[in-house]
Amino acid sequence: MQEVLALIRHHGDWFYLITFIWTALEGETFVIFAALAAQRGLLNIWPLFTAAWLGSFFGDQVFFLLGRVYGKRLLARFPRLKPKADRALRALEKYATYFILSYRFMYGVRNVSGIAVGLSGLSWKRFAALNFLAAFIWASAFCGVGYFFGDVVQRLGRRRKEIVEYSIRELMLLVLGIFAIIIISRLVSLRLQAKRAEQKGDERHSS
């Protein structure tokens, strides 16, 4: 929190641009504390949210482009990234839409996932549309947590940094779990609708 307040004091006029740049890379903890500063009247939450949304979107578009143009060379240059990229590609092959909407909430794989999507055959237009929506969900989640609950996180006391990082991971898993429940419920609903339609078709053919 103190680091965010220092940035606001020294670069107040540029803080939203700093947020845009920061969230292009990662920035969950940063966004939470920035939203807490907005709760205290030091920032305007709506420009902050917009900067986080567009910064997250822009960052993943860049990683997608890097993956599309230089992906194989990057993995050859940094082989430790390959296992994460392979896992992302396997998930992408099975559940492309759901994976793109949710990988921001999987701790430590966001940037590698963007590169992996670029390595896949997914069109840039489809990725851009899904990425725009995913960035909106991400910015809403963390700005919302910071604005409404950030003061609770800020009072954690000793070993705050480690606790906050752990809490962020837990929050990501929680949001991802909620998202998975929604997706699974939707898939089950679609499956049941398809079965009902199939049964009605069989009844018409038999009559």
Image (cartoon, grey):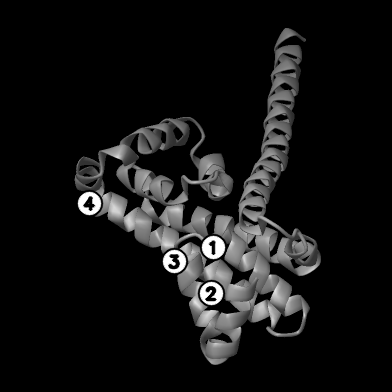
Q: Are the residues at dot 1 and dot 2 in contact (C-beta closer than 8 Å)?
A: yes
Q: Earlier in the sequence, mark 4 or mark 2?
A: 2
Closer to the eye: label 1 or 4: 1
Q: Position of residue 119 (x, y in %)?
A: 31, 43
Residue pointed to by mark 3: 58
Mark 1 — residue? 27
Residue at 55 percent across and 91 percent down: it is 13
Please say if the residues under marks 1 and 4 sit with CB atoms less than 8 Å apart.
Answer: no
Residue that badge 4 annotates: 70
User: How many numbered dots are placed on residues in this image?
Assistant: 4
**Could you tell which of marks 1 and 4 lies nearer the N-terminus?**
1
Q: Secondary structure at mark 2?
A: helix
Q: Kindly identify the residue that appears in the image at 48 percent across and 46 percent down.
A: 108
| C-alpha distance separating marks 3 and 2 | 12 Å
Tell me the CA gap for discs 1 and 3: 13 Å
Which of label 4 and label 2 is nearer to you?
A: 2
Q: Disc 3 to disc 4, how far (Cα)?
A: 18 Å
Which residue has dot 2 on it? 19
Does dot 3 land on a helix, a strand or a loop?
Answer: helix
Q: Quadrant of the C terminus?
A: top right
Q: Residues within 10 Å of mark 1 (few under 14, many from 20)?
A: some
Is 113 rendered above or below residue 30?
A: above
Q: Residue furthest top?
A: 206
> Residue 122: image x %, image y %?
38, 45
As helix, strand or loop, the secondary structure at mark 4 comes to: helix
| Amino acid identity at mark 1 | Gly
Q: Which three-letter amino acid code belongs to the residue tagged 2?
A: Thr
Label 1, label 2: how many angstroms apart (C-alpha)? Answer: 8 Å
Where residue 21 appears, x then y in whole percent?
45, 72
